Amino acid sequence: MKTVKFKNKNWEVAAILQFPENFDENQKYPAIVCAHPINSCKEQTAGNVYGKALADAGFITLAFDASHQGESDGEPRFLEDPATRVEDFRCAVDYLTTLAFIDKNKIGVLGVCGGGGYAANAAMTERRFKAVVTVVGANYGRLMREGDLSADTAIKTLETIADQRTAEANGAEPLITVYVAPNEEARVQAGLNDIDIVEAVDYYTTPRGQHPNSPNKLLFSGLAPAVAFDAFHLADHLLTQPLHIVIGDKVGTFGSYRDGFELFNKAASKDKSIQIVSGASHYDLYDIPEYTSQALDKIIPFFKKHLA
């Protein structure tokens, strides 16, 4: 494993390269870009579960912190901007092509949760990705628009963002909110009992998955572009690469189950598959070996087929 950095515009993106056993820098290897979920970082599921397993299977993997987040540069901090997130993928491929031991014609992409939605979106215009995998891939724009599922949620959200931007333009401190309740007690007090929310708090705020590069902070005033983002827009025209989608059948409010089927049905890929891991929830497929091993039993052969 090696820590590296690559450029996105005029700032640096922090990443981790992982190598197969008996790596030989004089050989050429297929590579896979691994993208973390919303509210995550490179050291969590994308890097330490899927990235590691794929490296063990013979691939070079590159897991990176999104710009403005984790150890990556970019101001303002804690920004979740879809356009920048998608550009990170292109810059990751740029970086991989500079490495002599990478086969430039054998680069794939894997994304988890929101990273899966971004991976699919990036692959539509990044033709250097030759194969695409999403694990509980979620369309972040849909999540932002739905909120409490009322018809005018998106408009209310945008109006609140507009008010906050006005306040900050006139001297107010930036509003930093949270993705999930900061602890189990706060979740219970708020009455948040959906399985995805319960398990998100468990993953991000306990030793199970907690990491200092994933501080549960979000810049509220920067969210307007996310409300208008659709990760799967034009997939029926532009997403033509081989595609494998992994979802669990324990369905929660984050919607990765239905997003998986929407992407599968919409994608123009002629070679596409959807894997439903029985008994698995959204967060089970982050790090629970019983379920991630089943996902990887399909993911690894898929990448070997299309990047070999």
Image (spheres, rainbow, N blue to C red):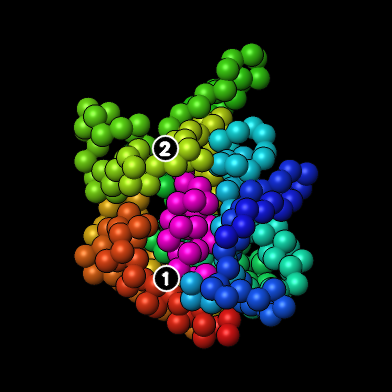
* Residue 192 percent location from the top left of the image: 25, 37
- Numbered badge on residue 179: 2
Determine whether 43 is above or below 155 in the image: below
Write down the quadrant of residue 239 in the picture. bottom right
| Numbered range of the magenta stretch | 34-55
In the displayed orientation, state which residue is furthest to the top.
171
Q: Residue at x 57, y 63 (%)?
A: 18
Residue 147 seen in the figure? no
In the picture of the structure, the residue carrying the numbered disc 1 is: 245
**Magenta segment includes 252:** no
Q: Residue at x 52, y 86 (%)?
A: 305
Of the image marks 1 and 2, the number of the one nearer the N terminus: 2
Determine whether 232 is above or below 219 in the image: below
Mark 1: which amino acid?
Ile
* Residue 20 percent location from the top left of the image: 55, 72
Q: Are marks 1 and 2 in contact (CB under 8 Å)?
A: no
